[in-house]
Image: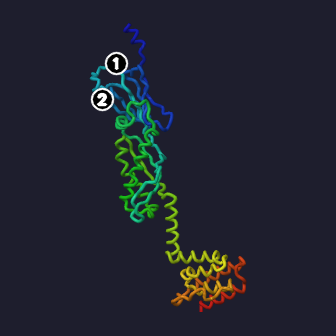
């Protein structure tokens, strides 16, 4: 019976792994009741590593190449099993293959806005996203801390942990950088480098190397972005005074559409163009002769000097009213002559 049992045993002569996808990071060679033949061939392809595990203890690690499995090529396993140099019997051992190919275009991002303290805006909420790339460098560390005795382990199983850890460090890195959010667009490379440096020790503890980490976008939630856009627009127009002038000029056609509207706009016109209440009163009187001239009180102080650009802008606005039928040509000519006198 002992002889028959020996004959029935099946021995493994070739150990290899042909990867069938790009996501598997660890794969256990199927052993079942098989035993590895002494002198069997181990093939480890480029971008792979192989590990022999004896009773839960990581023994010998192999890089790319072809090996004949003997006591000379399995020194750690030989020591663990107390083999002598003449040992040539089949043996059992778990064999794991690991993919060292780079995992590229891995996406990370904040599922919800992260609250940070900005030196210019105070407490704000922001979103960020980007990509990163990594590869396995230490199969022993990866086996003992991540994949364990699983038959296979894929990058999808790991990415949730990696992505969430990256996001968890964003607020710390942003605060330590000292860069205001408004300047972050021109500092995204530096921000990404700082975040990469912070993440590298964690990747190394898993037996991985973080090859790159890029920040592709940092943005505010829509409601905060709208407020920032308005502030930027004010600054681009030269500050609040220029912004008020612009708003006043835009409001003239709307005010003129209502009887007496330009009179109510007098204060705004005075601020925006320096023409003051006198211009508003004259324009209102031209549009509504029945209105009493005294309805608009004179300015207590002399009108501020009016620049040529401001007068030209006002004339253009009035001319637009002629085209819309809100002013007659005669009324426009009279106001134009009055405004042009101020250039003298």
**x, y percent for residue 337:** 66, 89
Instruction: Classify mark 2: residues with Cα within 10 Å, few (<14), some (14-19) or many (20+).
Output: some
Q: At x 39% / y 12%, what residue is drawn? A: 6
3D distance between C-alphas at marks 1 and 2: 17 Å
Instruction: Classify mark 1: residues with Cα within 10 Å, few (<14), some (14-19) or many (20+).
Output: few
Residue placed most toward the observer, 323 or 168: 323
**x, y percent for residue 315:** 64, 83
Would you name the residue on which mark 2 appears? 76
Residue placed most toward the observer, 54 or 108: 108
Left or right of residue 218, residue 38 in this image: left
**x, y percent for residue 138:** 36, 39
Please identify the quadrant where the N terminus is shown: top left
Would you name the residue on which mark 1 appears? 89
Above or below 12: residue 57 = below
**x, y percent for residue 203:** 37, 44
Residue placed most toward the observer, 3 or 233: 233
Quarter of the image for residue 17 reads top left
Instruction: Say how the picture is coloured.
Output: rainbow
């Amino acid at each position: 019976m002992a002889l028959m049992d020996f004959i029935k045993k099946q021995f493994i002569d070739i150990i290899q792994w042909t990867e069938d996808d790009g996501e598997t990071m660890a794969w256990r060679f199927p052993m079942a009741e098989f035993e590895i033949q002494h002198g069997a061939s181990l093939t480890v392809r480029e971008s792979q590593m192989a590990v022999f595990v004896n009773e839960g203890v990581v023994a010998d690690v192999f890089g790319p190449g072809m090996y004949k499995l003997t006591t000379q090529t399995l020194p750690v396993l030989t020591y663990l099993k107390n083999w002598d140099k003449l040992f040539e019997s089949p043996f059992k051992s778990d064999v794991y293959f690991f993919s060292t190919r780079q995992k590229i275009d891995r996406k990370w991002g904040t599922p919800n806005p992260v609250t940070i303290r900005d030196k210019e805006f105070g407490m704000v909420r922001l979103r960020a996203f980007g990509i990163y790339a990594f590869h396995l460098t230490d199969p022993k560390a990866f086996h003992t801390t991540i994949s364990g005795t699983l038959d296979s382990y894929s990058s999808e199983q790991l990415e949730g942990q990696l992505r969430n850890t990256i996001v968890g460090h964003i607020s710390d890195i942003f605060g330590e950088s000292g860069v205001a959010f408004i300047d972050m667009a021109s500092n995204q490379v530096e921000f990404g480098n700082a975040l990469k440096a912070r993440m590298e020790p964690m990747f190394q503890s898993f037996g991985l190397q973080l090859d790159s980490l890029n920040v592709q976008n940092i943005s505010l939630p829509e409601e905060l972005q709208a407020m920032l856009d308005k502030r930027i627009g004010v600054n681009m127009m030269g500050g609040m005074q220029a912004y008020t002038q612009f708003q006043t000029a835009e409001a003239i056609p709307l005010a003129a559409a209502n009887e007496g509207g330009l009179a109510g706009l007098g204060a705004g016109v005075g601020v925006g163009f320096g023409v003051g209440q006198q211009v508003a009163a004259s324009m209102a009187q031209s549009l509504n002769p029945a209105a009493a001239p005294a309805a608009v009180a004179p300015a207590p102080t002399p009108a501020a000097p009016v620049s040529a650009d401001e007068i030209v802008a006002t004339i253009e606005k009035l001319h637009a009213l002629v085209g819309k039928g809100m002013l007659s040509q005669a009324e426009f000519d009279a106001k134009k002559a009055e405004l042009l006198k101020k250039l003298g």
